[in-house]
Image (tube, grey):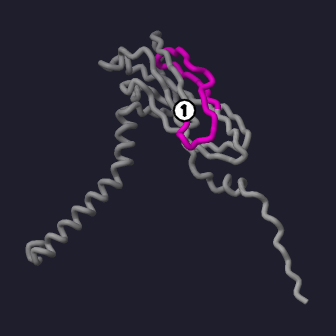
Amino acid sequence: MLRNLDPRKRTMAILVGVVLTMGGLGFASVPLYDLFCRVTGYGGTTAQADAGSDTILERTINVRFDGSLSSNMAWEFKPVQREMTVRIGETGLAFYEAYNPTDRPIAGQASYNVFPFTAGGYFNKIACFCFTEQVLQPGERVQMPVTFFVDPEIVDDPDGKFVEEITLSYTFYEIDLPEPAAQAALTPEQPAKTTEYN
């Protein structure tokens, strides 16, 4: 069909097709990359599990906890415990503490990864505050749990079997308040002024 078009129109149609294809690929790249990271553990992306491991090994691994904030986040945020030693396959429970020292509600979302990156696919979170957005009211301080285990298959991985320590890192970013919290953050409206007409 393109062969029957004028050469200029054919070139234009091809260029439009290329632009649309590139735009579609660009739009799909973020979710595809995220899926790739979650499946492979690439870049220290952790796995997610519905329940703990059925197998617990005698071998232990040290898990360190790290917390940071993006430059525009006004919270204070840190791990309650800096590290713990767990058996591979054993379910661990750690807490992070967040505090909102401001006079306004602030919503946050945590991004996360583990180091070394080779351990990402073997570090499984069962429950985590990072799965949902968090809202802290002015002056509110909370402890947020993360439940995890290290998959016993790590000992069969050519690189993973040498891992003796894993660092779990979180960074909190400020996000827009969800609608109900945004409404609660509004100051009470002043009563409407009434105007009397004579």
Q: Quadrant of residue 76?
A: top right
Residue 75: give x, y in percent of width and height: 63, 38
Q: Is residue 12 above or below residue 137?
A: below
Viewed as shown, does residue 173 lie left or right of 57? right
Examine the rendering and report whether any part of residue 131 can be seen. Answer: no
Magenta stretch containing residue 91, yes or no?
yes
How dense is the environment of label 1, judged by Cα within 10 Å: few (below 14), some, or many (20 and up)? some
Q: What's the magenta region?
A: 68-97
Q: Is residue 173 above or below residue 147?
A: below
Q: Is residue 156 above or below residue 184?
A: above
Q: Secondary structure at mark 1?
A: strand
Three-letter residue code for mark 1: Ser
Magenta stretch containing residue 15, yes or no?
no
Residue at x 68% of width, y 34% of height:
142
Residue 42: give x, y in percent of width and height: 35, 33
Residue under pointer 1: 68
Residue at x 53% of width, y 39% of height:
70
